Amino acid sequence: MSNLKKVLFIDTAHPVLQDSLEAMGFQCDYFAEADLAAYQQIADQYTGFVVRSKIPLDKQILPLAKKLKFIARVGAGMENIDLDLAQKLGIVCLNAPEGNRDAVGEHAIGMLLALLNKIPHVDSEVRQGIWLRAENRGTEIKGKTIGLIGYGNTGSLIARKFSGFEAQIIAYDKYKTGFGNDFVREVAMTEIFEQADILSLHIPLTAETNYLIDNKFLAKFKKPIYLINTSRGKNVNTADLVEAMEAGRVLGCCLDVLEYEKFSFEAINSETLPETFKKLLAMPNVLLSPHIAGWTHESHYKLSKVLVDKIDELMG
């Protein structure tokens, strides 16, 4: 039994992941009440970790995991994993952006349509017997210029989905070139500042992108914009965003993520909410959702299935 390959589920995943790993010959363990200290005690038993965002996988645990061959992140973002340390230790880090990119793309478009057409507001009015038409005119996507920052799995997918709205789609990616196609035109960041009516973020959270969207950044846009953020809350400085909205530089925003989320992304850190957050909540041109853009019934399965295929290829 000492040679049995074992995988530790630090977080839950769709059953297809555990079932498939067991079919590959792995024993799968999940300890719902365990914390970092408990994981440190048993880390050296496992060939693989499956994680979402329950704990950081860094110097506190990775050096203890002497047998670890892979970390499988059930999602796209990898900011809770020390990738440099993992590489030094010979641990392969896998994620599954292919699994939830459709969900994120559809959610972003849904939020934008709801914001531009004031759907939450007018739904509430009609339920109260208020029937205002001229006062609630919407704004069309057609003819607008949509600027994307980041052209990876989700950025490229949303460009294809947005193309049906007859908008001009432009994208900038600092780490990728030559990606222009029928759906999108590759541009420099200066052109996004010059042309964008709508800005959508599709970037990871790194030291480079933390508070990327701040006063200085927002001041560079030639036109007032709408902002969509389905990436990470800390990509946007909320205080600066609120200031830009009050000044009319940002016409409205769709935020599936907030900088005030707990590390696990499972809840708002309600003990540290500033006045800025209260201002944001009071704005009628703000649409919020609780970090669920990639959280559909379909993506729940696909995220795990993508990891099954990647683990099978790695260990096969």
Image (cartoon, grey):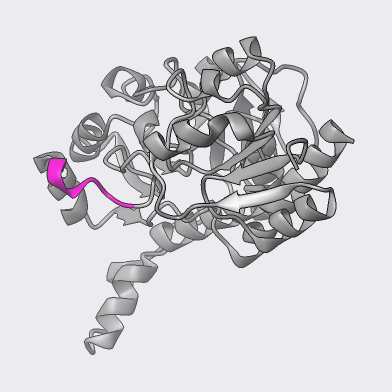
Q: Foreground: 185 or 33?
A: 33
Q: Residue at x 82, y 48 (%)?
A: 25
The C terminus: image quadrant: top right
x, y (%) of residue 297?
61, 66
Residue 97 seen: yes
The vertical placement of 311 against 109, above or below, is above
Q: Nearer the viewer, residue 22 or 176?
A: 22
Q: Residue furthest right?
A: 316
**Was residue 235 drawn as part of the magenta stretch in this picture?**
no
Q: Residue furthest top?
A: 88
- Observer-nearest of 266 and 26: 26
- Magenta part of the protein: which range? 267-273
- Residue 179 placed where, x, y %? 76, 25
Residue 240 drawn above or below residue 246: above
In percent of the image, x 46 and y 57: which residue is there? 111
Q: Is residue 299 above or below residue 49?
A: below
Is residue 247 shown left or right of residue 309? left
